[in-house]
Amino acid sequence: MKSKLIKEMKQNGYIETSSDGSMSRLLKPSGNGFSLGFLIGKAGRENLINIQWGVVHKPMWELQQEIENLKELNIQFLLFTNSVHLGFKANISESNSEAKAVLMSLKSSIEFMENEENAILEDTSNSLAAFITPKVFSYDKHLLNEGMAHYYGLLFKHLRSGVSVQEINLHIETLLASGISERSPPIYKMHLLSSYVGS
């Protein structure tokens, strides 16, 4: 079933850019370093398949890999994601009604992304500049998600005009004041960025 879904994506212009065996990433380049993309792969002991769509910004991802020392790891990554379908069995028959529903969900997502590409990328770019999560991606209002939006926004700004250690520290202080833990992933990553900028 996974191979059928990947074939459907490829027929719509998505290119399989990386795979670690269980997870595959397919991207369709757009403008200004952005690509639309899908993640599809098996998860958990139950051998279930999950599908997500989203966007990635290649220069940002390359910068993040350098800052977080991830270049040697084959990480399948999208910047922001929405679920297409979660948790169907990998060995499901293609004639099964659930399999047909999954394929229809995928086709609907591909069509939506094609029709709304400009709006999706504009929302993403504007939100990164404002250090918030794009509205098109449905995330819970959670401090960790807000923290990651700050981190991604700082990466995006650093690529465009540069950021200072003082500016990064101000974002850290703002997030800590809102209640996020000093040991949380966004704060840790922002400290890495601060060290990178200051070196």
Image (spheres, grey):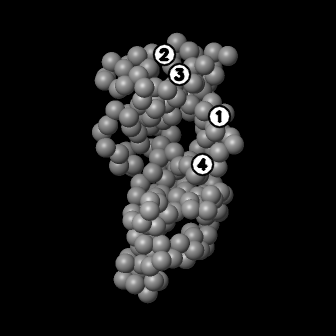
Give the distance between the C-alpha atoms of the residues marked 2 and 4, in whole angstroms: 28 Å
Image coordinates for residue 177, horizontal then vertical, percent: 33, 18
The residue under the point 30% across, 39% down is 141
- Mark 1 and mark 3 in contact (Cβ < 8 Å)? no
**Structural crowding at the residue carrying mark 1, measured as other residues with C-alpha within 10 Å and reported as few (<14), some (14–19) or many (≥20):** few
Tell me which label, 1 or 2, sits earlier in the chain. 1
The residue under the point 60% across, 48% down is 75
Q: Secondary structure at mark 4?
A: loop
- Mark 4 and mark 2 in contact (Cβ < 8 Å)? no
Tell me which label, 4 or 1, sits earlier in the chain. 1
The residue lying toward the viewer, choosing from 18 and 55, is 18
For this orientation, the residue located farthest to the front is 45
Give the distance between the C-alpha atoms of the residues marked 4 and 3, in whole angstroms: 21 Å
Tell me which label, 3 or 1, sits earlier in the chain. 1
Give the distance between the C-alpha atoms of the residues marked 4 and 1, in whole angstroms: 12 Å
Assign the C terminus to one quadrant of the image. Answer: top right
- Kindly report which numbered mark, 1 or 2, lies closer to the viewer in this rendering: 1
**Structural crowding at the residue carrying mark 2, measured as other residues with C-alpha within 10 Å and reported as few (<14), some (14–19) or many (≥20):** some
Three-letter amino acid code at disc 4? Answer: Ile
Q: Label 3: which residue?
A: 191
Give the distance between the C-alpha atoms of the residues marked 2 and 3, in whole angstroms: 8 Å
The residue lying toward the viewer, choosing from 111 and 2, is 2
Three-letter amino acid code at disc 2? Answer: Asn
Three-letter amino acid code at disc 3? Answer: His
- Mark 2 and mark 1 in contact (Cβ < 8 Å)? no
Q: Label 4: which residue?
A: 75
